[in-house]
Amino acid sequence: MLVRHRNAIILTTIIALSGVLVAQRVTADSSGASATQADGSPTQIAALPRYIDAGDGHTCVVLDSAAVKCFGSATSGQIGSGGTAALGDASAEMGDALIAVNLGAGRTVRAISTGTAHTCALLDDATVKCFGEGDNGRLGSGATTDIGRSAAVMGDALAAVQLGSGRTAKAIATGAAHSCALLDNDNVKCWGANDDGQLGLGDSDARGDAAGEMGDALPAVSLGLSVGVRVTAITAGDAHTCALLSSGAVKCWGAGSNGRLGSGDEESRGDAGGEMGASLPTVDLGRGRTAKAISAGAAHTCAIRDTNDVVCWGVGATGRLGTGAEDDIGNDAGEMGSELVAVSLGSGRTAVAISAGASHSCAVLDNFSAKCWGDGANGRLGTGTQNDIGDQPNELGDNLAALSLGTSRTVRAIVAGVAHTCVVL
């Protein structure tokens, strides 16, 4: 069992399901651990491991030294290597040969989050730095220039994202082309692409792509919270964003197609006035049910409920919702709440962590094994085949074997990317 402690050093091995990585030690502090509580119940940070994340074609890991190393595609500078050559496609490029990302003199990393072609890091001083593709302002730099393709723009030359006077961050989330931060005052601010209202600002204008849009000029997302209720975690999908509240409620905004917001329709929310704040509905997870953890995929969303089961909604193609069918859920009335079908994880099994990828989903179970379902292409489910799982009856539950990761190996964290999956053992 992994229990979160301040400044704890956690020694682990990383395995990618679509390839083999050189083993590294990774760590996380109290701001960025993937953990369960002492009683085995999940924390939100268990659902969204903050010291390893998988993007479209790249992966980043925070090491025990609190440095970060990234590998994979570098076309836009998203691995922060100061070049555009992919790393990790040759054995000589990994291990000690893989250089840590330079985020500034003396700076270390608390958390990492990867988008389609960009990466954001939460640093030890509670600032945020982003690098990679700059389109739509997703880096929060006030421009659309890619960052990370040259070493000269990294390190101290890479400016922190301006979050407002005196404001710092305690959590980050990246979508396909937007980024969000949970601030020290429990507000949420998002920047980047906003075609579907994923920034939650009541319009569809991108933020962060021009001067004067960040800092105090960037409004916080209005969630209409009651007194005493705060945001405890955020997650970002392709074009939608969700917040987990201290009450256990979940609110989602942005693109509504396929029901990914869980609102019972396909209306986008946050792209027009009057849709946010108290007007933004909470996701109906069932009578009396609340969420412990949430994870947004490209066009679907999953939650661990207070009963430690997993429910998913949004696009159902390839079985990513784990219902034994391919129907979308949450796009019509009467599909949420008591109608939600929990993912069958096996006899007596419950979930302690969840990760939603582009077209597949994975969970760490209470016995610290892991199971994945949805799109099986490229071996991302780790089943030894490329078959989709979860789109037909009787494919889940005891019929779905746990990932085979080695004798006596258990899973501490899992992340589902676009076409690959990584676990920390």
Image (cartoon, rainbow, N blue to C red):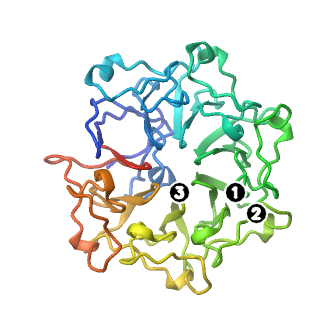
- Tag 2's secondary structure? loop
Above or below, 382 relative to 390: above
Mark before the other along the chain sequence, 1 or 3:
1
Q: Is residue 307 left or right of residue 188?
A: left
The residue type indicated by label 1 comes to: Arg
Mark before the other along the chain sequence, 1 or 2:
2
What numbered label is drawn on residue 230? 1
What numbered label is drawn on residue 225? 2
Cα–Cα span, label 1 and label 3: 25 Å
Cα–Cα span, label 3 and label 2: 26 Å
Badge 3 is on which residue? 298
Q: Are marks 1 and 2 in contact (CB under 8 Å)?
A: yes
Cα–Cα span, label 1 and label 2: 7 Å
Quadrant position of residue 92: top left
- Picture coordinates of residue 65, whole percent (x, y): 42, 23
Q: How many marks?
A: 3
